[in-house]
Each structure stands twice: as structure tokens, then as C-alpha cells.
Amino acid sequence: MSSNSKIIDTHAHLDFPQFDSDRPQVIERAKKAGVEYMVNVGSSLEGSRRSVELAGISKFIYATVGIHPHDAAKVDDKVFAELELLAKGERVVGIGEIGLDYYKSKVPKGLQQEAFRRFLDLAVRLKLPAIIHNRDADDDTLTILKEFSAKGLKGVMHCFSGDEEYLKECLGLGLYVSFTCNITFKNAKRLREVCCNTPIERLMLETDCPFLAPQVVRGSRNEPANLRYLVELLAELKGLTVEDVARITTYNAKSFFSIPLTDVEALPRIAYNIRDSLYLNITNRCSNGCSFCTRGISDFVKGHNLTLEREPTFEEVIAAMGDVSAYKEIVFCGFGEPTLRLDLICQVAKYLKEKRAKVRLVTNGHGNLIHKRSIVSDLRAIIDRVSISLDVDSKEKYLKICKPQFGPGTYDNIIDFIKECKSAGLDVEVTCLDIEGVNIKKCKELAKGLGVEFRQRHLNMVG
Ligand code: SF4
């Protein structure tokens, strides 16, 4: 991990006695390992008090307050009133650890559920996210979470260990999912597969220390500095760099717990890096109004702020790119349709060709409609590869889902654009989305019939 990369341990128990002899040293090791903050999760009344106390002493620590289901029987009015007071503290960022545990807990299910509901209600009232523990209680946990998600609950499934179906249910409720270092265990193949299928935009990192030390130090006391092993594994599983995983999960954690971004993190990006590609964000305008577009929902994509204050000039794009020699490719992409700024694409791509860079254009394929003429001859000499987002398998679906400003003829026009690009000798790939209702097999056949490559895109995937 580069020295600039920062990560957040979203679930640690530094208040536990296992850290009594060397807590300051543990914190120092975490900082050296790139941990920017840790969220100390309260799991008992005393633990919640300690959690708030620790957050008061160290700016490195944020606190949450809650009672683990093991102690649910202790949640009476007095205890709850004190926790509610603690929850209003300045550096308290969540309610938890709360939930249901039918595996180990001796507390009757009814009592656990009552306490869980009480805390979820508190989370909703105080507009704080909930940190949810679930062990062997999938159905009841989901039933209760559904009640509260209808009331605006924000939550994370801590130490996720469910299957694909459960993951889908949780994501459907808008919940985040956090994985611990137990995914590094040799026997955690199934969990690693579930992790692979978790959109990284909803994923957070945690150690759950002192428990669940990673495979390399398994059996020892876990601590926040070990989070880097999780980052390394996630990068491998997701086909990203460790810097990408660090940036994205840190953004997720800050956004989830309402921890302020640094000025650098908040800065709108003209050029942004993912894996070994550099992406150029030259406009936020678009000729589509896709129902799945995230522009209206968040300013951020993969941990980069892509909402521009204004469209950049040629000079600003060149300055934002810096030295391009380290990148595999430079990609016109961003939070809008790049061909709306065709002149800028031509200018920048020409500059890049002089630098012998590989240049790719990601487009919705509306360029000919936007400029009321064929733009392919403009692109031929300066663009190496075009990724055309056809998204769906029929014109009817395109009209309904992508809502193009050019109306019903748009889909056929994109097909013509694909053919033209292919005949002009450009490398062409067509991409479609793996969302419900899209027939991917049909999309693949369509691309095959056009003699171009095909790629299936997941929602939120860039480029
Ligand atoms: S084409 Fe891309 S930028 Fe435009 S609306 Fe659709 S998803 Fe958003």
C-alpha cells in the first residue's frame, strides 16, 4: 500500500481488556500501517462508556454505542437511557453492536428481538447508522431490518458470513456489508466468493479485533494494523489495486459514518486513476437519462468525486493528467457523455498520441446524433479503442431504461455507429449491463453479429 493510501477499521474493540497493556502502541502501529481512523464499537454498557471515553482521548478513534445480543437481557430503561445519552456524544457515529445471536447467546429470542428493535428505533431517531450482528438468525434479522429500513434505517451487516441469497436481500435493503480478516482463512473459499460478488461501493473493512486475526497470524490477538492483509486480498479478489480498495472503502466508511472527507478527497476530479488506467472526466452533461445512472444519487464513483464545478479547458485537462507514461491507457469516460465535447476530445487525444499513449473512448454511441453528422472520421486517427454502452438488448428497453433525448430511433443509430467504427478500423467493444430484464445472451449474439467484442458490465463499473 502506498504511503498516501489510508484505510479505516470500521469495527474494532480497543476497549477490550486484551489491549490494556499496550493500547497506545497498538494505535501507533495502526497509524504506521495506514489506518486513518478506527471505529471503536461498543458492545456492552461499560464497553460503550469506554468507547466514548477512548474517542474523547484520541482523534484517531470514533465511537459507537450499543449492546451485543449476548447482553440483551440487561437492556432495561435505565441502561437504555444512559446509552441514548452516550449516543448523542460528539464523536459517536453509530449504534451498535446490536442484533440477534441464536448460536451462542443464552438470552431468549424474544428478549433479543425486543432489544434489537429498541436500538434500531434509536438509530433511526438519532439518524445514526446501525452496526448489525447476526449469527444463525438470518430470517428474524431480515424481518426486523425490513421494518426499520422502511423508516430510513442505514446499517451495515458486520462480519458478513451469509450466502449469495442473503447478500442480495441485504443489498436490496440498502445495507452495507463489512468483511473481516476471516476471509483470509484457508477454509473461507465460499466467503471469498460472496465477497467477490459484493459491489465494492457497499463494502467496508473491519478487523473485529481482538478477534479473527488474519491467516498469516491466525490464533494471535488481532489489531487494526492487520487490516492491510484484508486490503491486499480484496484487491486480488476484485482485480483492483490496493490503492483503489483503500480509496473506495475509505470513502464508503466516511460516507456511512458521516466522517468528513479531507480537502483532497473532496476535490472534483478531471483526471482519475483506477487500476493502471487514467480516466478523463470532461463533462457532466449527457444525452441519456438512464434510470440506473448514479449522477443524481452521489457525486462519487470508485471513491473519486466526479461532479465538476464547470467543464475543464484543454489546458486544465493536460495539467490534471500530468505524466501519462505510467498508464496502460487514457480513457475518456467520466460522469457524462464525452462526445458532447468532441473538439476537446480531438485536441487532448492528439496530444496523447504525440506522447504515444493508448487512448480509449467510452461513449453512449450518440456522437453522430449529437453532431448531426458522422464523427467517426474525427476519431479514426486519434482513438485506439471505443467502448460503446449499448446497455440493453432491444430498442424498446433502451427507450424505457436509458431515456435517450433523441427518442425512438436512438438504438438503431447506435448500431449504425458501432458498424461505422468497426469499418473505420477502430477496436470496438460493446458493453451491456447485467441488470434485471436485460438478456445478456442476446446482447452477446448482437455483438457477435456485428463482429465486435462484447463485455458485460456490472452496475457502477467504470469504463
Ligand atoms: S449514459 Fe452514462 S452518464 Fe449518461 S445517463 Fe446513462 S449512465 Fe449516466
Image (cartoon, rainbow, N blue to C red):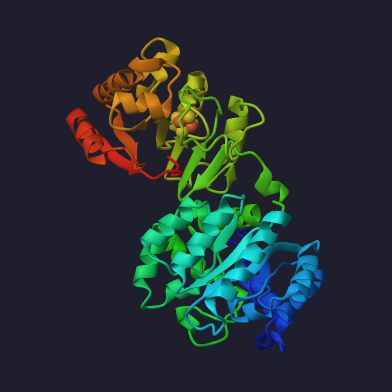
Is residue 382 visible in this depiction of the protein? no
Q: Nearer the viewer, residue 146 or 461?
A: 146
The residue sitting at the front extreme is 110
User: Residue 348: image x %, image y %?
Assistant: 51, 27
Residues 357 and 37: in front is 37
- Residue 457 falls in which quadrant of the image? top left
Residue at 80%, 74% in the rendered image: 53
Q: Nearer the viewer, residue 351 or 438?
A: 438
State how many labels appear.
Answer: 0
The residue at the far bottom in this view is 21
Q: Quadrant of residue 128?
A: bottom right
Question: Compared with residue 369, is residue 189 higher up or lower down, i.e. above or below?
Answer: below
Compared across the picture, whether 272 is left or right of 370 comes to right
Figure check: 286 above or below 54: above
Indicate the quadrant where residue 68 lies. bottom right
| Viewport quadrant of the C terminus | top left
Residue at image coords 74%, 64%: 92
Whole-percent x, y for residue 350 in the image: 46, 26
Can residue 106 be seen here? The reply is yes
Indicate the position of residue 242 as horizontal and vertical percent values. Answer: 50, 60
Residue under the image location 65 percent in, 87 percent down: 18
Quarter of the rendering occupied by the N terminus: bottom right
Give the residue displayed 50% in from the left and 39% down from the top: 279
205 vs 102: above or below: above
Pinpoint residue 450: horizontal percent, then vertical percent.
21, 28
280 horizontally vs 411: left or right: right
